[in-house]
Image (cartoon, rainbow, N blue to C red):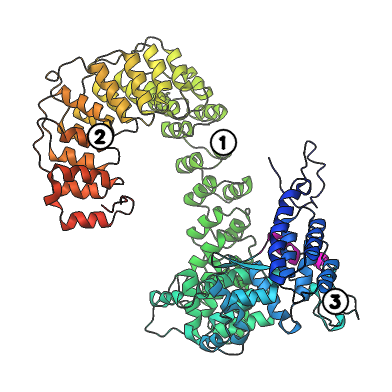
Amino acid sequence: MIITSRPELPSTRDLPILTTILLEDRNKNDILQYINDHVSRLAKRKKHPSNLENDIQRALLDGAGGMFLWVSLTLYRLERSPGTSASSIRAQLKELPKDIPAIYASILEEIDFALREQAKRILEWVNSSKRPLSVEELKTVIALKVQREHTSIAIMQEHVENNLDHFFGSLFGPLLKIERDTVRFVHQSVKHFLGNLELMRKFDSREGAVSVRTGVMASEQYPVSAFHSTYREANLHLAIDCLTFLSSEEFEMRESQDALEYHSRLSEYLFLEYAATRWPEHGKETDRRGDQELVEAFLRLAHSDGTMNSAYQIYHEYEEHGKSGVCASLGFTDFVKALVEDGASTNDQGGVHGSALMASIWSRSEAVIKLLLNEENKNINTSETMLAEVSAWCKTTEPMELLLSRGVKVTEAAMIAAAKNWHGPEALRCLLAAGGQPTEPVLSTAVKFYQRKEPLDLLLDEGGKVTQAVVLAAIEGWKPDETIKTLLSRGDVEITEAMIVAIVGKGAVNTELLELMLCKNGTIQITDQIMATSARTSKERDVLKFLLSKGGKVTEDVLVAAAENHNGPQTLKFLLSKDRELQMTESMLLAATRNTPAKKYMDPLLHRGAKVTEAVTGAVLLAAARNRDGFEALEFLLISGGTKVIMSETMMLDAVGGPSAKQTMELLLSVGGQTKAASRGGQVTKRVIEAAGWSASKKFVEHLLSIDGTIPIAEEMLVEAARHTEGLEVLKFLLTKPDHKIPITEAMLVVAAKNKHATKYLLLLLKRGGESMITENVLEAAAGNWGGKGEDGT
């Protein structure tokens, strides 16, 4: 592990084996070379004498402390210094900042007093925006101070800084950079400096002192620390800027406009997407949501339904939404309060949530729910659906009680929702007190989403009945051991075979629980289905041992299930050891060859005498050829099984289409290749050759054709060879076959023109008589192939 840091790394006593390498001791030569190169160019440009050039080099090297950043920032300032006399330069060298924070402080001190508030806002945007802003977006942000006085982007455009690079250079010097059309800090340490108020205060000038650089009295200055903004303060300002921009009259939506039409404006107003999608984030991350300026900015936006809906449609891509509904869905209590006081209706319908109250319920904002359901707002619409939604998540019962006080009835849906509530039994207790019933679906939900014992005990205490459906739901739940034990201790229910199958199907069931369930019904037999289910899912042997002790048998179906178990072959090996007389069958081998890694599942079966005979070759080998293990599974099966292969066309197609096509086909042919083509029924077909054309070598295709010499060269074979990037040698071979009589067609040229190596393929086909087949389709295919154009432009 390598940890990189500035020299002021905190204590490393927790890393006793740490080896520290100080770059200051290692990079002096590199920094010296950098200084010499840049100072030499600086001296030529400003016509410094050689002795002054040496003084600059020495001062920079002495002050660098191993930091390239300090050198580059200092050089930047020296290059832009207006003085060129030796005395002025030497005076500057004496005043060089001692470290990087001092450089940042001196840059901020030199910003014109009248521009410092604007500079602070720009730094806030670069520092706190949710993503780096583009140059065009930041131009809009800089002009927003005018927008707050007007309502038109057209007016604001008159105040946009057109040359942002020059503007930043004159205002911030090297602090900001434009990189890939986005504005960023020159280094992460700028962000650290601006966020450290205590550090910035060290550079504030004393009261009455005169700044060496600006000549302004400190009492008249905007101190360095004034450029600091807390994270929450910055988000407040950014939220206000976004809301202000969105209030522009250009974003007013007329009735004829829809969301899609409005989205087309995103390309026209580049800051629109950021402002509409990010203002809620900035608003939520300030600790002053009730700030008067923020509320006023929102009310300006909400003053028009058009601008409000425009902003919300970009944010959520929903249809129109009422003003209060927007605020409620975002959880802005102060905004909702301001709108209600301003006369906005809380029952306006719109958007995916409908009303403001439902929007606040979906956003899980208890504060907004309480505000909307206060006594003064008597006409707000409520519903049973609202109660059900609140019951599913509320931490306190106050929102539920407010809805119940408005006459909302308790439904089974509300009870089911409360049974899922992770915060404890209080929601259920509230609904039960209001007339809710612990029905079977409610109890089933409680055991399925079981987190703690109290809700289940409460429902049982209130008359909930333990039924077979409830027990099955508990088996499917998160904690079946706890819930089933509780249910069996509180109710008398008949345990069925289906329950035992379901519980062993969980894979990690407790044998103590199985014993308890079987004791409840002593007539249950351990059937093949129970054994097979356990064999298919179990991770440990304990459950199978228990089931065998209760009369379970190892049968063919059980071993097939064990061969399908994805938790490893240990279950299969264990069951094989329990019945050494059982015959191995094709079904067992099929299941093993379909599992992964197939070799580990097939091995114990083959050791027990499973045979790959001609009767089972087709299905088993086909399964092995399709296995994700590819070549390894098939090779192991053939070598271990020791049988001749009767290959079908399907098997060959699967083999040549796999990831190890050449190896797989050669293996199949080597094992069964002694059989004549006639006895194999001519299984090496034209389709096999076509499929092999792209995945194999010329030698391999030649071998396939030699097995059945009656297969003629067909157009489809040439097309497939020309289609694939590795098919050039195969294409050459097929074109030079003595029995080749297929003319070059348009289809061959089209696929060749699309090939990654189009030039080589096309030259080969054109030499074979394809010139006359150069059609519009061929030229179109070649024109669209950017990766296949040759140097000669073919």
Q: Secondary structure at mark 3?
A: loop
What segment is highlighted magenta in the picture? 186-200
Q: Indicate the position of residue 602 as horizontal and vertical percent values.
A: 38, 20
Disc nearer the start of the sequence (3/2): 3
* Amino acid type assigned to the residue bearing label 2 in the image: Glu
- Where residue 620 sits, quadrant-wise, is top left
Residues at circles 3 and 2 in contact by the CB criterion of under 8 Å: no
- The three-letter amino acid code for the residue at tag 1 is Asp
Q: Which residue is mark 3?
A: 212
Q: Which residue is mark 2?
A: 729
Q: Percent x, y for residue 562?
A: 41, 24
Mark 2, Cα crowd under 10 Å, few <14 / some 14-19 / many 20+, is: some
Q: Nearer the viewer, mark 1 or mark 3?
A: 3
**Residue positioned most to the top:** 581
Judge whether residue 138 can be spotted in this image. Answer: yes
- Assess disc 3: are there few (<14), some (14-19) or many (≥20) residues with their C-alpha within 10 Å of its C-alpha: few
Q: Is residue 703 left or right of residue 535?
A: left
